[in-house]
Image (spheres, helix red, strand yellow):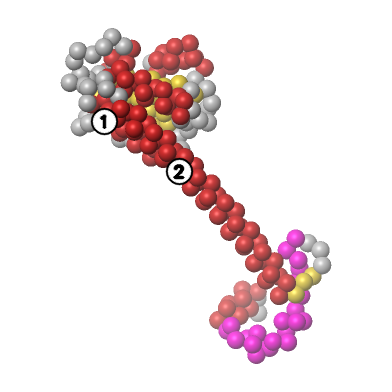
Amino acid sequence: MNSEAVAQYLHENPEFFEQHSALLAEIFIPHPHGGRAISIAERQQLALRDKNRLLETKLRELIQFGEENDAISEKMHRLSLSLLGARDLDSVLNTAYFNLREDFDVPHVAIRIWAGADLPARPEFMGATIEMCAFADELVTPKCGPQLLEEAPSWFGEAGPNLRSFAYVAMRSEQSFGLLALASEDVQRFYPEMGTLYLKRLGELVSAALLRYLK
């Protein structure tokens, strides 16, 4: 009889050790971390301790994730209140820049808009290319990673050549009317596999605030 057959038999006959309880005190197995042999009872205790440590680690991770999500939600709330308080287009843009840089700690932020009339003479409303508009139209969800738009680094002035990661968020109502770009010198700040739920909500907030003044 091979080991698989023994394991299957014991699994199918849990009463075996009740009928042969003396064996439990006589069987010794190797310690999982080396050294002396131990009894089945001791081995079970070690297995339970290992399982508890694993569960404690997972619990700490869940608590950490929860705290991080709470902190982000609080920042989103503050941004929402600030955007609600903005009384004109300039104020909306300045509020978005300020909160993203100071509260969300995003080092570089740029906005480009190609909708509306009688717009102020600001960089946000100048130089929208066909490629940029098409790129935003295809952004169903935010996209993160290295440079995806050839022109993007030029939006950030002298810092542009040193930027290594970007997050692109389309601003839209029924269709896209602008693009929000976040950037960092840290190649891991915005990476392709990162979650984008809060970036999507961020784009929706800024879009809603801007649409009040884009006619």
Q: Nearer the viewer, residue 35 or 63?
A: 63
Q: Which residue is mark 2?
A: 70
Question: Splitting the image into 4 quarters, where does residue 5 fall?
Answer: bottom right
Magenta span has 2?
no
Count of numbered tags:
2
Q: Residue at x 17, y 21 (%)?
A: 215
Question: What type is the residue that disc 1 sits on?
Answer: Ala
User: Which comes before the other along the chain, label 2 or label 1?
Assistant: 2
Q: Is residue 47 above or below residue 211?
A: below
Return the x and y of residue 68 as percentages of the image width and height: 49, 42
> Is 16 on the left-hand or right-hand side of 170?
right
Q: Is residue 179 above or below residue 42?
A: above
Return the x and y of residue 28 as percentages of the image width and height: 76, 75
Give the CA distance from mark 2 to mark 1. 23 Å
Return the x and y of residue 179 as percentages of the image width and height: 32, 24
Extreme-right residue of the structure:
36
Q: Which residue is mark 1?
A: 208
Q: Secondary structure at mark 1?
A: helix
Q: Quadrant of the N terminus?
A: bottom right
Question: What type is the residue that disc 2 sits on?
Answer: Asp
> Is 128 on the left-hand or right-hand side of 18?
left
Span highlighted in magenta in the image = 13-33
Q: Is residue 12 visible?
A: yes
Near mark 2 (Cα within 10 A), the count class, few <14, some 14-19 or many ≥20, is few
Q: Residue at x 48, y 47 (%)?
A: 66
Q: Is residue 12 above or below residue 139?
A: below
Q: Residue at x 39, y 33 (%)?
A: 78
Q: Is residue 179 above or below residue 69?
A: above
> Is 155 on the left-hand or right-hand side of 210?
right
